Image (tube, helix red, strand yellow):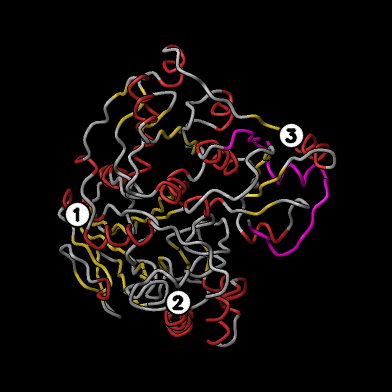
Amino acid sequence: MYFEQFYLGCLAHASYMLASEGEAVVVDPQRDVDIYLQTAVANHLAIRHIFETHLHADFVSGHKELAARTGARIYIGAEAEAAFPHVSVRDGFLLQVGRMSITALETPGHTPESICLVITDEGKSPAPWAILTGDTLFLGDVGRPDLSKRYTPVQLAGMLYDSLHNKILKLSDEVLVYPAHGAGSLCGRNMRAERVSTIGTERLTNYALHIKTQEEFIRQLTSNLPARPDYFSQDAEINRAGAPALSDLPALPAIEPRTLHKMLAEGGLALDVRLGDQFAAAHVPGSVNIALSGQFASWAGTLLGLSARPVLIAESDEKIAEARMRLARVGLEGVCGYLKGGIDAWRDAGLPVATLAQISVQELNAKLSNSNLQVLDVRREPEWECGHIDGAIWWPLDHFKVSAPEIDHSAPIAVHCKSGYRSIIACSLLQRAGFRNVIDVAGGFDAWQQANLPVVTEKPVGV
């Protein structure tokens, strides 16, 4: 049996290819499907089957394009009400592929249509070898239960408890566990960084599996859920219909600096995807920085929305292409062009260039006692509660989609996150909103702690 995991770090997304006797199965494919086609060719495989463990909300799947390019059938849980040609899967559904068998378990909870796939390598043993758990069971966590329009989080959490205890945990301890997401995904809260586990390990270490009663499980899973980006429901509907092929997207036009200057004056949006330090040194005034170096697409979808029509700013054509691909992976397809020649061309055209001041944690600490400097913490609530700078204002980056924090425009604002990625995003949004005295804290709270500077813990007080 052939088995390979494909891990897309920017979305913390895992997809899979399994095969036996030259016939291949792809599970939970990412939007850009060439990786599976190339792997199949390299291993002399024919892709004949595609499984979706559920209607993904955090990314757009490539199942429809992959099926069109290979002739493969798509299999998805019957409760998905999928609008594309597919095979509806119910509990106990069995697919035989060479000497490999795939048995589906209906495991509602994360979503009503969620399924898990039990894999048996019959060439080695008649006992199950692994389970692909989608977003039902993660390593160290379970799927969030608030992504359905049909069921309440309480109802879904109850279903999830039953799915875990009556289906998945009936498997033996040595069965391998391969989920659809890892640490960093918003589909759960406490995922570990590993890419594979076992039923036995999860039984011992996964907090959610230690909760004794269904009532307590429901209470814990529906309390303090991380913010759900607006684009999640849109992505689920795109996946229900099946996304168009990426090749259908039109070529991006190059936009001259003065044309972009006029577009921005008329309310347009420029998205700078360069590293934060490059953005701080020089950027187009009013542009938003979300660097390709982090969870770029997730933050773009969260903060800009899928209807955004940004002009991209990058240092090379390769980075422009990468940014566009990664935006398309979450369904943000309205990119209307890119700045021809980048920031250098903007500067050469004689147009104004903005900068962003940066400060070390030592400098920040020295200023706190004898200045009117405000400190803005843009981390998520669990991060804040584990420790923060005394007197800081808490306004998580997720909230910027709704509004900028209501803080004093006239006083300087020092912005920090954990390590610096999110704080640069927040600084760019504040500058775009009209704040003129914005400072990024280099290294973020990690650097503050490493310098052994004072930390307090308390419930967050927003603004």
Foreground: 157 or 202? 157
Q: Looking at the image, is mark 3 or mark 2 earlier in the sequence?
A: 2
Type of amino acid at the residue the image marks with label 1: Ala
- Residue at point 58%, 50% (across, down): 405
Residue 190: x, y in percent? 58, 64
- Give the extent of the magenta segment: 435-462
The secondary structure type at the circle numbered 2 is helix
**Residue assigned mark 1:** 67
Q: CA distance from mark 1 to mark 3?
A: 52 Å
**Residue assigned mark 2:** 153
Nearest-to-viewer mark from 1 and 2: 2
**Residue assigned mark 3:** 360
Q: CA distance from mark 1 to mark 2?
A: 33 Å
Q: Main secondary structure of the magenta part?
A: loop
Foreground: 398 or 217? 398
- Residue at point 47%, 47% (across, down): 299
Give the quarter of the figure containing the N terminus.
bottom left
Q: Looking at the image, is mark 1 or mark 3 earlier in the sequence?
A: 1
Vertical side of 128 occupied by 97: above or below: above
